Structure formats: C-alpha cells, structure tokens
Image (cartoon, rainbow, N blue to C red):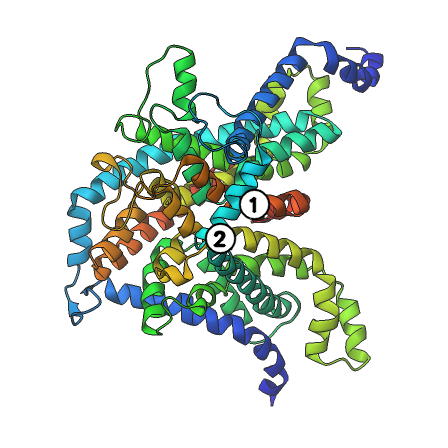
Amino acid sequence: MTIDAVAEAPASRSIALVISPWAVLKWIVAICVAIVAVFPIWWMINVVFSDPGTPVSLNPRLYPTSFSAGFGKIMMIMRETDYLKAYYVSIAYSLLTIVGVLLIGSMAAFEFALFNFPGKRLMFAVVMLSLMVPTAVSIIPTYLLTAELGWLNTMQGLVVPGLASAFGLFMLIQFMKTLPKEMLEAARLDGASHFQLYRYIALPLSKNALVTLAILTFMKTWGNFIWPLIVAPNPELYTVGQVVGLFNSPYSHQTVDVVMTANLLAALPPLIFFLIFQRKIVEGIAMSGTKG
Amino acid sequence: MIAKKYIPHYMMVLPFMCLFAVFFLYPIASGFFYSFHDWNATTTVRFVGLDNYSRIIGSRDFNKAMWNLATYIFITVPLGIFVAFCLALLVDSFKGAWSNIFRSAFFMPVVLPAFLAATVWRWIYTPNFGLLNMMLGWFGLPSVNFLNDTGTMLYSLIAVDVWVSAGFNMVIILAGLKNIPKDVYEAARLDGASPLQQVRYVTIPMLYPVLFFVTTYGVISALQVFDVPWLLTGSSFASYGGRSNALLFPVMDMMGRGFGSLKFGQASAYGFILTAIIILFTAAMFVFRRKGYDQ
C-alpha cells in the first residue's frame, strides 16, 4: 500500500459505503436487526390502534389503522378498571424512590468523595461489598422485616427498603471525586457551613450525575416487578406491573387489543423518558460499565 | 475534642448508613439466622441446624432448577455477548446520524420494563394465532408451542433474554470501542491486517476489561433470573415453573418455597446457597483475569 493510498483512505471509504457489496450487506443486517428490536413494540401500538374485532391472526398489523379506536380503548381502561390508580401508585413509588435515593445518596457521596473522617474506609468497603451480594439473598429477610414493621401494603413498605442504593452511591462518588476542591476551600474561607458547601456547591455542580441517576432509578423502579409483588399484594396498592400481570393472566377474559392497551400504557412512561433523555440513559449505563 | 470536628461529616452519612444497616445488613444477618431454623411465619422458630440446606440440595426441584440454570447461562451469556459485540461493531461502523439511529433502535428493548417484555413476547409466542407461529405458517412450517413444549421452552426464554439484554451490553461495549485509539487500527492496517484480523488482534484484546465486566455482570444477573420466566410461564406462588418445571429457576424456586409453602427458613437458606455460588463464580472470574494478565 502506498502512502497516497493511505492518505486517501477516508475519502475512498465514504464512497465505498454507497457501492460495495459489504456496505449493502451491512445496511441490510442493521435494518433487519432494528426491525427485530423495534417490531414487538410497534406491533403492540398497532394492535391498540385498530378497530376492535379484527382478528389479530389475519394480518400482522404493520401500521395503526384507527386512532379513535385506540383512544377509545385507553379511555375505557382508565374509566372501567383500576388502571389509573395503579398509575398513581407506580408514579408515587418511582418519584419517592428517586427523591430519597438522590437525597441520601448525594449526602453520603459528598462525604465519601471529598472528605476524610475516622471510619470512612470501613463504611465505604462494607457498602461496596454489598454490590456483590445478590438481591436474591436479601429479598426474603427484607420482606420479613417489612412485615414485622407492619409496613406490608403501605407506600413506605414499597419505598423505604430500596432507598440505600449502593449502586447510586457508587455512581455519585465517582462523579463527585472530580469536583474542584479549590472551589469548596474558597467557599469555606468565605464562611460557608459544611451543609452549605453541599447544598450550594456540590449539588449544583453534580446536576448531570444526579439527572442520570434519577433516570436510571426511574427505569428500575417502574420496572420493578418482584418487590411490589410480595410487599404490596393488596389491590389498593397494585403497581402498573401487577395490573399488567392481571390483564395478561389466562383468567382475565379480556380481548387481545384491550390487553395490549394495558401493556402499552405501562410502556409509555419509560418510552417517553427514553425519547427525551436518550443520551443520558445510554451514557449512564456505559459509565457504570466502563468504570465498574 | 477531635470527634467534634467530624460531627458534620457523620450527620451527612447518617441517613444512608442507617437505612443501609436496617434494610440491608440486618436482613442478611437475620436471614442467616432463619436459614438454620424451621419457621413458617406463624409457628415458633425451631432450630434445625443444616437441615434446610440439606433438604434444598436433596430436593428434585433444586436439581431441576440448577440444571435449567446451567444450560440457560451456558447459552444465553455467550450468545448475548456475541450478539451485543456484533451490534456494537455494526453501530460503530456507521457515521453520524445513522450510527445514533441504529443505536437507539437496538437499545429500545432495554427501555421496556422486563415484565412488559415478557408479556409482549408471550403474545408473540402464542400457539396458532401468535405472530411467530403465523410467520412459520407463511413458510409452510408446522406451529410450535413455544411456551408449552418442554423441548423449546428454554430456548424461547433465551430468545427473549437476548432480545432484552443485547442492547444493554451493546451500549457498554460501544463505550469501550470509543476508547480504543484510532492509530492502533491505523498501525494494524498498515501491517496488512484484514478487518477480521483487526477485530481479532486489536479490538478484542483492547476490550478485554469491558468484556470481562459484561460477562461477569451477565452471569451474576442470569443466576438471579426471575421476572421473565415467571411471566412467560404465567406463574403464581401456587404453581410455577411451567410445564414439568422446564422453566424453573433457583430464584423462582426460592420465592415459591417462601411465599407458596411459607417455608421461610428454607427460602433464606436458598438465598445463601445462591450467594455462595455467585461469590465462588466471581472469585473464579477474578483469578482467571489475573492469570490472563500475567501471561
């Protein structure tokens, strides 16, 4: 290969992208995989937005056919079932968890990342070790404790046991380690109290990491199936996940399109979040992977 | 006093550490205690020594669950990572907007809650009028009972699992790919390495830490698989695992013993058996990694 050929490589590659058989194959594969990845979600939308009664088996709905029918089904589910209540429960469960995780996590991360005090290393080691312990081992004893506290079928029973998130703490510590120490020092010389350093310097500067953690926590809480299943078996506190389970159970006596409407409604918040915060979600996951 | 100086620090970590102690450390300690006792939430606690452990290990369900788990992990983790790796290379080979569009599309399944992925796939797998069987019909192939035929159930689960996890691992691998300096590829190309050789001798060695993480994390989460098989089989605490327990997994078995037959002592012991397996596995992975570095 001559020097000239190397220098021209980028230019010739972009032309090759259009014509070479490899490039064609690449596009075909990419599009096929994209269809496999997205189609089940797209199909769900199409089943919802079609006239009721058309048997699903005859045509794999490739596009939505009736918007009014779809909205009709959504309204019907909201009016005639307890779906709306489950929505409130899931939203409250997610929001309270996010606020709690961010608040206590950022307070602790602030100390662990920026200061030294006796016992810090031990505490940090114990918390990090817990990242290795599977949920499977703690879930039943945590349930028993929650029951002992009389918190079964309560919102605090859902939320509080999940607040001390070792993962969240780890992520925030990683971020806060990069905060400029001089800034904290300057603020302290200006007479800021310890809490003020946290509130007015560390928190605002960590906004990015906090937003990322909030989104990841939302995804996790909204999708949490096992904990609400055991801790809140009362229909009053059904989360969206449990209601979806009811709709899909063999005894639900609902038609396919109604069941799919229920499924779509559960998928909507995370999908909307994804469309808005795509970059943050992807970065957050990539960060936890490459640094962990 | 020295201690006084540190009070503000302790105040700040106090909420986290308290909740952590109460809802993580204490439950684990109490679970350890229960694992040596017979207790069904109403009777008095009775010490039984290692009875819970031996009963679990000797039970038919445990063996079935472990066997399912081993087969499942052995296929799903390598396959999932292979798919994710190919997808990452694919996305990386596109430029600009298309790279982002394909990345988002491949990532979409990760956004769905697992419970939803399972329910939607259950419909796709439905016999007769399910999407997949319909497509088989187009090619004149016989209908397959994906979720009720003991020979295919495990593979149906693996398909859903790869569909869900590929995008997640892809994003992590992509971040790793971005960290590989471009001049390494340039050097390899000058040495006459084909694209495939570049992947083999540049990309994979440079991605070693990332692939290590993805594998370890993949196995640890696969060991605890619950939501998807539970929902695919339409399980409840009264009956779970699907037809002849073909989709019975350890965490399902554990939850069933706890909440189905109220044997909380056994369920706690089950958790510790699983933890022991996970710790052994993680330790093995790290030893393996150390060896890899030494060579």
Q: Which residue is drawn at the image coordinates 37% and 33% (left, top)? A: B157
Indicate the chain on which mark 2 is placed.
A
Indicate the chain on which mark 1 is placed.
A
Compared with A145, B77 (above or below) is above
Label 1: state its secondary structure: helix
Residue with the mark numbered 1 = A268
Compared with A232, B179 (above or below) is above
Q: Which residue is drawn at the image coordinates 70% and 66% (left, top)? A: A203
Q: Disc number at residue A160?
A: none
| Residue B158 rendering spot, x and y as whole percentages | 39, 32
Left or right side of A242 for B183:
right
User: Which image quadrant is residue A117 in?
Assistant: bottom right
Residue with the mark numbered 2 = A79
Find the distance from the CA under tag 1 to the CA under tag 2.
Answer: 18 Å
| Residue A115 rendering spot, x and y as whole percentages | 65, 71
**Residue B76 showing in the rendered view:** no
Label 2: state its secondary structure: helix
